[in-house]
Amino acid sequence: MKTLTVSVASYNIEKFIDQALEPFLSDDVRSDVEVIIVNDGSKDRTSEIAHRYAEKYPDTFIVVDKVNGGYGSTINTSLPMASGKYYKLLDGDDWYNPECLKEYINILKESNEDLIITSGIWKEEETGKETIHPAFGECEENIQFTFEKYPTNQSIHAYNTTFKTSCIKNQGITITENCFYTDTEFLLKCLSKCNTMKYFNIPIYMYRIGRDEQSMSLEGLKRHYKDAIRYYKEIIRYQNTETLSEAYKNNYLENALVSLLQYHLSTFYLLPIKLKKEYIELDKYIKEKSKRIYKLSSTGRIKILRKTHYIGYSIVAWYSKIKFDRRSII
């Protein structure tokens, strides 16, 4: 059995795919990884380049060519195929840190937890500046814990996580297709299947930021705000219909949903004023489907708008645009 299955979401990334795949060529890690490159209907040379790796190293690389279905569809494709002990995502324009990849693989070999949490490095596309982002502010390393003992008010991202494959495979997890922001959907759904976890402050994931194509850039927010609404509603549906542990809901999911709702509602202020109707519709949907999330998210500008029946929306939006700092929204 391979130690790690890596699902590489690939769409028109011919400029980046070599950097994403080359770290797995090292002799001391290649035999331990299964890299599933899901070519999501690319129109450039992404598939051609990926197949070169698979032809030369067939025991390590697998290429799946499929029609475009979005990020979620790449997960829905690779997860049923995964045969490694652990499963981790990789955006095709990001890469894993080659300096600590072997150490990370060794950690996975010795671990048996449902979830391994690691850190990452954010690299700014324009300046090349690299910043280490620990997953947790304060948390003991290499100590097993559960959601009952989850660090208070600490959130993680999909890139911080490595899931035990047997914990999430064949568990009915499907991710919304043809939709952005589904890495968060994947994270929250997979976390619901986990009991035990460990944290290691090892910066394995290299996260490229600052591209206009990214969903978290300002241009991305303008293009994909409907996807944000769509995936958030799906998580609320999941919360309401699935049997989830109280420890997970109370000590992680609830805090995550409150934070996400506050974020998504706040980003509306940076979008055209004409989208006020969509803002109100989402806000009222949450009030109807999850009164507790609605109540806990009622702070600051959101609280003011609710109390005034959204009368001051245009003023709030104007002020938010003035104060906007692109770096704060990544």
Image (cartoon, helix red, strand yellow):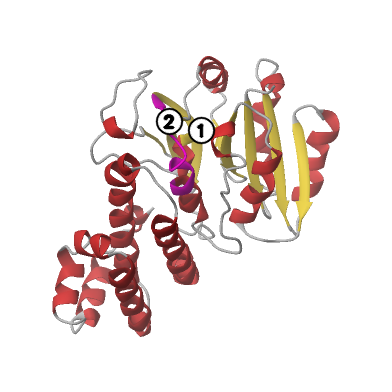
Query: Which image quadrant: the N terminus?
Result: top right
Extent of the magenta region = 188-199
Q: Name the residue under label 2.
A: 117
Q: Mark 1 points at which residue?
A: 162
Q: What amino acid is at disc 1?
A: Thr
Point out residue 20 in the picture as x, y percentages from the top left corner. Answer: 63, 37
Point out residue 128 in the picture as x, y percentages from the top left corner. Answer: 47, 41
Q: Is residue 232 left or right of residue 38?
A: left
Real-space CA distance between mark 1 and mark 2, rounded to the nearest whole angstrom:
6 Å
Label 1 secondary element: strand
Q: Which of 36 and 79 is in front in this view?
A: 79
Q: Nearer the viewer, residue 310 or 187?
A: 187
Q: Quadrant of residue 179?
A: bottom right
Point out residue 153 in the picture as x, y percentages from the top left corner. Answer: 24, 41
Is residue 231 one of those drawn in magenta?
A: no
As drawn, which residue projects farthest toward the right? 55
Residues at circles 1 and 2 in contact by the CB criterion of under 8 Å: yes
